[in-house]
Amino acid sequence: MKFDEIKKLHQKKYRQALGYCLIEGEHLVQELEKACTLHPALAEAELYVSEAYTDFPSPWPKHLLNERQMASLSETKTPQGIIALVPLVALQALNTAPIQSAIYLHEIQDPGNLGTILRSLAWFGGMRCLLSPGSVDPYNSKVIRASMGAIFHVPIELDVELTSLSHRFQKLAYLDMQGRPIADPSFAKCDCYIFGNEARGVPHQALASLQAQAYTIPGSGLIESLNLGTAVSLSLYQRQGG
């Protein structure tokens, strides 16, 4: 791929058109290498490195960049000197994992929230991540950095319509201020957990049509709500037995 095309991968439309994304930083590249042992499709990556990383041990081809080129490719204030070019089809191959349970994220917008959620999903294991149309792109560099490499271990499905969930799952759950506490034994028996947009949540009319069960995370009442990433993490912890 031409260098000018690679620079365009910071934009979602070009990631989709060209079929690649960028993974920046030594830690994330190392996590990508670890994931290759579990997911051979990830072995198709290439590295773009500064002189400091010319001897970096890697199974992938390396391309040396000068400081100006690295700065133009990097999305961080201080370029880290190592960037992997990864085919999206390789990351999307993770969707073949035989995992039935899922969380569904409806129109979430914050890259940091999605990254945190992916980290929690990787930590607890056994679930896939479904994203509605209009959600933040999981291959956005901010999401990838916030996930700390978890994105290489969690099956992700894009553009999943909310209305399709009732055909795929038997027991749907969502969080609300009114509902059964998540400590209720029925919560762990659900196979899909629905979480909404940071500001608007999920339309109640849609939830009613899905016959989803409302649950709540009991709190002191001193604040109005929990951060989305925190709510998902607490739910996943409770689901595995608290």
Image (tube, helix red, strand yellow):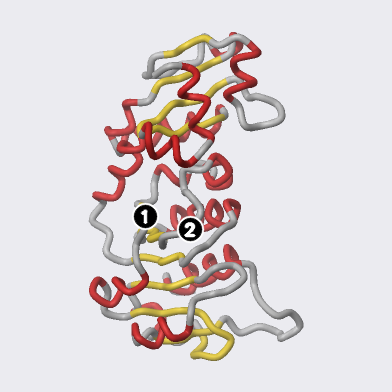
Q: Is residue 46 above or below residue 148?
A: above
Q: Residue at x 71, y 30 (%)?
A: 77
- Contact, mark 2 vs mark 1 (Cβ under 8 Å): yes
Front in this rendered view, residue 202 or 233: 202
Classed neighbour count for the residue bearing mark 2: other residues with Cα under 10 Å, few (<14), some (14–19), many (≥20): some
> Residue 199 vs residue 232: left or right?
right
Q: Residue at x 58, y 74 (%)?
A: 200
Q: Residue at x 30, y 38 (%)?
A: 89
Q: Which residue is mark 2?
A: 135
Q: Secondary structure at mark 1?
A: loop
Label located before the other in sequence (2 or 1) = 2
Image position, residue 53 (x, y; %): 56, 14
Q: Amino acid at mark 2?
A: Ser
Q: Which residue is mark 1?
A: 158
Classed neighbour count for the residue bearing mark 1: other residues with Cα under 10 Å, few (<14), some (14–19), many (≥20): some
Front in this rendered view, residue 107 or 147: 107
Image position, residue 196 (x, y; %): 51, 71
Front in this rendered view, residue 145 or 26: 145
Image position, residue 226 (x, y; %): 64, 72
Q: Amino acid at mark 1?
A: Leu
Q: Quadrant of residue 222?
A: bottom right
Quarter in which the N terminus is drawn: top left
Q: Residue at x 47, y 55 (%)?
A: 123
Q: Secondary structure at mark 2?
A: loop
Image position, residue 35 (x, y; %): 38, 37
Gap between marks 2 and 1 measured at Cα? 9 Å
